[in-house]
Amino acid sequence: MVTILTAVMIFGLLAIVTLFVIRFSSKPQMLPDSITLPDGSKAAAFTMGTDWYGVVTEDDTILIFDRSSGVLRQTIAIK
């Protein structure tokens, strides 16, 4: 009984390690070289999607930029 539980736990650990290796060995996400924010804005957080990246500013605004051109796509005010 103990050996079956041990085998299942070892298999589960190997599965988790395999998933981490597969996930993190995929094509790395490229960060933009630089981001130009509107005057007076300071970045508080950064996130990326497949074809966009977003910056949350300290004045509670979300700025969505196009990933390939760096052009500001959308501005969202957080209320």
Image (cartoon, rainbow, N blue to C red):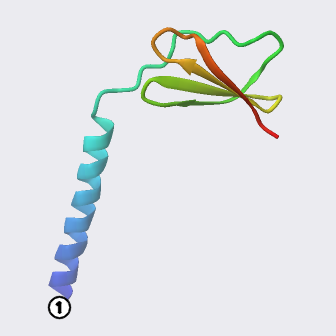
> In the visual, does 2 lie left or right of 47?
left
- Residue 39 picture location, percent across and down: 80, 9
Question: Which image quarter is the C terminus in?
Answer: top right
Residue under the image location 49 percent in, 8 percent down? 69
> In the visual, does 8 lie left or right of 59?
left
Looking at this view, is 11 or 50 the one in front?
50
Provide the secondary structure element on which disc 1 rests. loop
Choose top left, top right, bottom left or bottom right for residue 12: bottom left
Question: Which image quarter is the N terminus in?
Answer: bottom left
**Position above or below: 54 against 73:** below
Please name the amino acid that badge 1 sits on: Met
> In the visual, does 5 lie left or right of 69?
left
Choose top left, top right, bottom left or bottom right for residue 41: top right
- Say how many tags the image has: 1
- Residue 36 picture location, percent across and down: 66, 9
Choose top left, top right, bottom left or bottom right for residue 74: top right
Looking at this view, is 49 or 30 the one in front?
49
- How crowded is the residue under tag 1: few (<14 C-alpha within 10 Å), some, or many (20+)? few
Query: In the rendered image, which residue does mark 1 sit on?
Result: 1
Residue under the image location 71 percent in, 13 percent down? 37
Residue under the image location 17 percent in, 75 percent down? 7
Residue under the image location 27 percent in, 34 percent down? 25
- Residue 55 picture location, percent across and down: 65, 26
